[in-house]
């Protein structure tokens, strides 16, 4: 079903005579010709500087295989909005850039923040890649010495304004994580419609008895927000330390305001079976949301 301008250009929004936006449009004989798509897919993915999560980017001799892996993951999931943590602007030692890969995957709107070099400082690099326009980008670091962040921007999806927040909470201090999420919530409280995504580093959160559930996740649940992880869709593993150790974690999350429903949640487990010998690190978490 589609509607078009007189010149044949397909439209993604319909209006009535009073210029009010319509959810549905019908032909003169009552047949449905347009239904506004109010779903979007959001991915959050800590890319571990595109390699093994050890604060260095892809070696030159592994560029081809990691290019195939990482581009394949992003391209196949075809999310409307992608939030990338531990982002390095330089994909590999060959000089291949991360933004070139995102552009190849069809992302028109891309904002890179930090991640200027492949060494330790790139652990706090981040990027938002979107198929919809991004505006009002604001970078914010937590004032707790961690260097972690909670950046925000506005994404306009078919005329619907969404406040998007990307974050990376403290990696080994639960008290700081609790304070950081409380600070984020003070920001979210000013938004009518929002999506929060990122690496929450909730290392003890396998069920509701976990210390990070109590310190971090419960704050979000009690506020009435919708969560892709650690709530109605279960406690989903998004981190695998193999082959270094067998430790796994429920670390990554996508959270939405009460007026944005989460319809479906999945992970991309390609890295668990790709037969590359390096540490798996994070895998992507993907949610389909209804605006």
Image (tube, grey):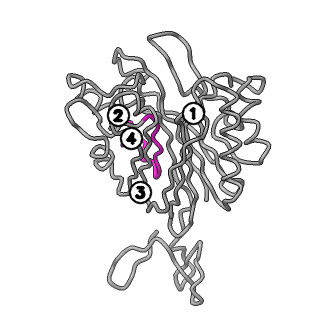
Seen at 32% across and 83% down, the residue is 7
Residue 243 position in % (x across, y down): 44, 11
Residue nearest the observer in this picture, 22 or 171: 171
Against 248, residue 39 (above or below) is below
Q: How many angstroms separate mark 3 from mark 4 (CA)?
A: 13 Å
Q: Earlier in the sequence, mark 2 or mark 1?
A: 2
The stretch of residues the image draws in magenta is 72-86
Q: Is 6 one of the magenta-colored residues?
A: no
Q: Label 2: how many residues lie within 10 Å, few (<14), some (14-19) or many (20+)?
A: many
Q: Nearer the viewer, mark 1 or mark 3?
A: 1
Residue marked by disc 3: 131
Mark 3 or 2 closer to N-term?
A: 2
> Does 54 sit left or right of 7 as displayed?
right
Split into 4 quadrants, where in the image is the C terminus?
bottom right
**Separation of marks 3 and 2 at Cα, in angstroms:** 18 Å
Numbered disc in front, either 4 or 1? 1
Labels 1 and 3 touching (C-beta < 8 A) = no
Q: Residues within 10 Å of mark 3 (few under 14, many from 20)?
A: some
Residue under pointer 4:
74
Helix, strand, or loop for circle 1?
loop
Task: Give the residue at mark 2.
Answer: 70
Question: From this viewpoint, which residue is outermost toward the bottom?
Answer: 17
Task: Name the residue: 33% across, 40% down.
Answer: 89
**Disc with the residue nearer the chain's start (1 vs 3):** 3
């Amino acid at each position: 079903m589609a509607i078009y301008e007189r010149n044949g250009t397909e439209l993604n929004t319909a209006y009535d005579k009073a210029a009010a936006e319509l959810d549905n449009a019908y032909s003169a004989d009552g047949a449905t010709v347009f239904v506004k798509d109010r779903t979007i897919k959001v991915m959050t993915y800590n890319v571990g500087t595109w390699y093994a999560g050890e604060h260095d980017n892809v070696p030159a001799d592994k560029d081809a295989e990691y290019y195939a892996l990482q581009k394949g993951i992003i391209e196949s999931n075809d999310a409307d909005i992608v939030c990338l943590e531990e982002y390095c602007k330089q994909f590999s030692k060959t000089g291949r850039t991360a933004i070139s890969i995102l552009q190849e995957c069809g992302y028109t709107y891309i904002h890179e923040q930090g991640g200027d070099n492949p060494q330790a400082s790139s652990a706090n690099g981040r990027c938002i890649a979107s198929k919809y326009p991004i505006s009002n980008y604001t970078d914010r670091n937590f004032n707790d010495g961690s260097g972690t962040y909670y950046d925000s921007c506005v994404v306009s999806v078919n005329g619907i304004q969404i406040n998007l927040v990307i974050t990376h909470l403290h990696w080994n201090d639960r008290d700081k994580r609790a304070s950081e999420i409380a600070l984020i919530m003070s920001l979210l409280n000013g938004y009518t419609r929002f999506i929060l995504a990122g690496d929450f580093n909730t290392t003890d959160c396998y069920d509701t008895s976990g210390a990070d559930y109590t310190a971090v996740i419960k704050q979000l649940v009690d506020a009435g927000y919708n969560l892709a992880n650690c709530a109605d869709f279960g406690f989903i593993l998004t981190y695998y330390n193999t082959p270094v150790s067998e430790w796994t974690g429920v670390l990554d999350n996508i959270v939405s305001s009460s007026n944005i429903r989460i319809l479906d949640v999945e992970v991309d487990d390609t890295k668990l079976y790709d037969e590359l010998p390096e540490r798996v690190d994070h895998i992507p978490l993907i949610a389909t949301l209804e605006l």
